[in-house]
Amino acid sequence: MTTEIFYDGGCICRFVRYRMTTKPLFVHCCHCRWCQRETGASFALNALIEADRVQVLQGEVEVVNTPSNSGKGQKISRCPKCRIAVWSNYAGSGDAIRFVRVGSLDDPNCFPPDIHIYTTSKQPWVIIPHEMRSVAEYYRRSETWPKESLERRVALLARWKQP
Ligand SMILES: [Zn+2]
Ligand SMILES: [Zn+2]
């Protein structure tokens, strides 16, 4: 028997509280200009996880349509009171996969990046350790994600398509 571990988080004003019921599929540290502008900082740290593994424990999120790098937009889920973003859904993976803002977790140290992406626009003072995986832009999921995460994604897409 394994003990279940949850990863809880929320917004600044604590109106929204959520729970990731498992570890994420993969963690992106994105250095694109869009993420820099959105965070007002140097990169975004996003934990990708099946939408049905994120439970809203308290409050509700407001979904804001926001432009994105792909041109297809992203939906950012924010606290309706303090407006802090807790996760996004991108056009690419649709509503099935949430990009949880790691900084909104109670313990943001849990999930260091599995990969650094869009390092072409990385701010020059950010030094990525050379043993860390990093790519100039994006990557091929089939070559990069652990087998278990690829299997979880297949299972997710199968149940997501069901009416
Ligand atoms: Zn709030
Ligand atoms: Zn980005």
Image (spheres, helix red, strand yellow):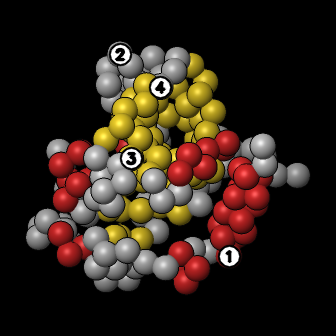
Seen at 18% across and 49% down, the residue is 37
Q: Which amino acid does label 2 sit on?
A: Lys
Q: Which of labels 3 and 2 is toward the front?
A: 3
Per the model, the C-alpha gap separating discs 2 and 1 is: 39 Å
Give the residue type that dot 3 points to: Gln
Helix or strand or loop: what does disc 1 sit on? helix
Give the residue pinned by disc 2. 81
**Residue at 46 percent of width and 68 percent of height:** 114
Q: Distance between the residues labelled 3 and 4?
A: 15 Å
Q: Point out the tag, 4 or 2, that comes first from the N-terminus.
A: 4
According to the image, label 4 marks what residue?
61
Q: Crowdedness of circle 3 by 10 Å Cα count: few (<14), some, many (20+)?
A: many
Eye-nearest disc, 3 or 1: 3
Q: Is mark 4 on a helix, strand or loop?
A: loop
| Residue 11 to residue 38: above or below | above
What residue did someone put label 1 on? 147
Judged from the image, the secondary structure of the residue bearing numbered disc 2 is loop
Query: Which residue type does callout 1 highlight?
Result: Lys
Q: What's the CA distance linking mark 3 and mark 1?
A: 27 Å
Given residues 28 and 142, the one toward you in this image is 142
Q: Which amino acid type corresponds to the residue marked 4 in the rendered image?
A: Val
Label 1 Cα crowd, 10 Å radius (few <14 / some 14-19 / many 20+): few
Asked if 8 appears above or below 68 in the picture, the reply is above
Q: In this view, does 94 lie to the left or right of 118?
A: right
Q: Toward the viewer: 74 or 145?
A: 74
Image coordinates for residue 47, horizontal then vertical, percent: 48, 53
Image location of residue 1, percent across then percent down = 88, 52
Badge 3 marks a residue whose secondary structure is strand
Residue 10 visible in the picture: yes
Q: Is mark 2 within 8 Å of ligand 1?
A: yes
